Amino acid sequence: MSDQRPPAPPPSPPLSKAKRQTNRRRFIRTALLTGGVLGAALSGFLPQIYALKKRLRPPGALDERDFLASCIKCGQCVQVCPVQAIKLADLVDGMGVGVPYIEAREQACDFSCDAVQCILACPTGSLTYIKPDFLPVRAGAALAAKPILVAKEKDAEPTLNLKERIGVARLTRPEACLAVQGKGFKGQSRGADFQGRMRHMAVDRWKPIKVADHPYDVAECDLCARECPVKGAISIETVFAPDGRKRKSPVVHEPCVGCGVCEMICPVEPTCITIEAREVWKA
Amino acid sequence: MSDDVLKKRFFQQIKVMFGWEPGKPTQISDAAKQVHELKRLTNKQDLLAVKAHMRAHEVKSTKWRNRRWATLIFANLLFVLSYWLDIQVLEGSLTASRFVGFHLIDLNSALQVMLAHKHIITNLLIGTGTVLLLWILFGGRTFCSWICPYHLVAEWAEKIHLKLAEKRLVSDQSIDRRLRTVFWILFALLALATGYTVFEAISPTGILSRALIYGPGLALLWVLALLVFEIFFSRRAWCRYACPIGLTYGVVGILSPLRVRYTLEGCFHEGDCRKVCLVPHVLDTVIKGRAVAPQVPIGPDCTRCGLCVDACPTGSLKFEVKGLSKLL
């Protein structure tokens, strides 16, 4: 070890007025950029604070807060979806920018991938079959049994490996519902221009077709129950109206996972049946 | 002696990456001292004549810039085409993807998610590990200049800024470089404390990558605001003073064998390299009298963009892979 040390630097002369001013301006600019960037970053909290939108998340999504924490915003779920049901949110969703959601009325998840591809694609476990132990399941979010896919009913393994629902269907406008009114339906359920697609086993098991390419002719409208991909999730039942008279109505049952096919297929404008995102099952 | 001073410089350069200003070296190897001395003794008239001669015959090269832009555009195009044409080579976006099935996850995004979610699944770990290895091999911040789409648009904005600055319509307002470290810590703490990946909401890298692949959105306005700030106010401000992704990859670059190497002997100390550099503080060694050894590797904050290699009229700055020259 040598004791040779570099000579101490000469004491720095006091800063000139110009130099001091430059330093001060530089400090102000630094503060300005700090404020700007942090302000922009924290403005992402605003939509969360105001809970502006309750978005329907893809199947297997963790609860909203955990979902936003774990999603890496890569869009791999978007890429694998055969019906392109998944979209990525924009700036107005704050922290949720780049996070996937489903606009069921435009394009619902019809499980035509059979294996819930988006869950398989997710690299961070935001969409998952197996929830980590430390994340509790909300009461009513758990499915009583693995949902049975109507399309796969005759397969050896007809179930989807889903343990929780992403929402629940609700008849929000019973007065407009064709089934309630006892009316039938003929034609394309959403018109000729509708771009949404769906799988029809009778047409092609692997290739979803346009909803517009599959017109209906039913004496009593039952499209929501007819097209629901999950067994036993919705049926048309005879119920008693408030005035005591008997009438038909779609009734949602416990197996409903909240996929949104009923919302997409409902021929009434606006839809009579909607998915309440993150809503849980109440008997 | 030469090894000692270079080791010292190695650690100093890490400090410089975190925001310290590089100072005059306190110790210079004898070999380097000799070269400095020789340069001092050179007849000034001769030196000027040689310089003028070199300037007259100078060929402006854009070799590395072209290669880099081609790579950057190709990589981002691969993302876009994988989705649009469904060729499934590189699925996902820059934050996380799969290259023919193998998980790749951006280090900074992975870090944000781990801190916010506090739970790490195997795929996340595999993807992060793969990318970590990849960038240790290829030079850390190489990600910035060779892959990041924001870097490319910022380079174009920089050209506008320089044009305007030439006409004295704008001037570059420098900002404290320690700010980037402060942001890195702040965003890590914010993710940990709030459970939101706060930085991801404003990351221009993520926003641009998603916009290219999944279509544009309002979030591009933020990217535009950054570019406007850089054109009219502060040159390359986001990459220089703010981006935590750059610092994350910079830390990875500490370990990387791929880097630019400076050779003192032929250098005329004219500073062309520092004028084009995104991070001129890593090129302090080219200032007259500063080089501590005859050959000095450039520090970890260097993005390995090669602009200095192109700009150097004397070939004093070259890419090297540490240890490879010994092997060959």
Image (cartoon, coloured by chain):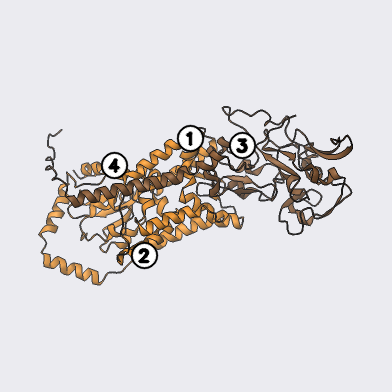
Chain colours: A brown, B orange
Q: Is residue A52 in view from this perspective?
A: yes
Q: Pointers 1 and 4 in contact (CB under 8 A)?
A: no
Q: Secondary structure at mark 1?
A: helix
The residue beneath circle 4 is B15
Residues behind callouts 2 and 4 on a single chain: yes
Residues behind callouts 1 and 3 on a single chain: no
Report the Cα–Cα distance between label 2 and label 3: 48 Å
Quadrant in the rendering for residue B188: top left
Q: Pointers 4 and 3 in contact (CB under 8 A)?
A: no
Report the Cα–Cα distance between label 2 and label 1: 45 Å
Judged left or right of residue B190, residue B299 is left
Q: Secondary structure at mark 4?
A: helix
Judged left or right of residue B36, residue B182 is right
Judged left or right of residue B318, residue A107 is right
Q: Secondary structure at mark 2?
A: loop
Q: Which mark is residue A128?
A: 3
Residue pictured at 30% horizontal, 62% vertical: B311
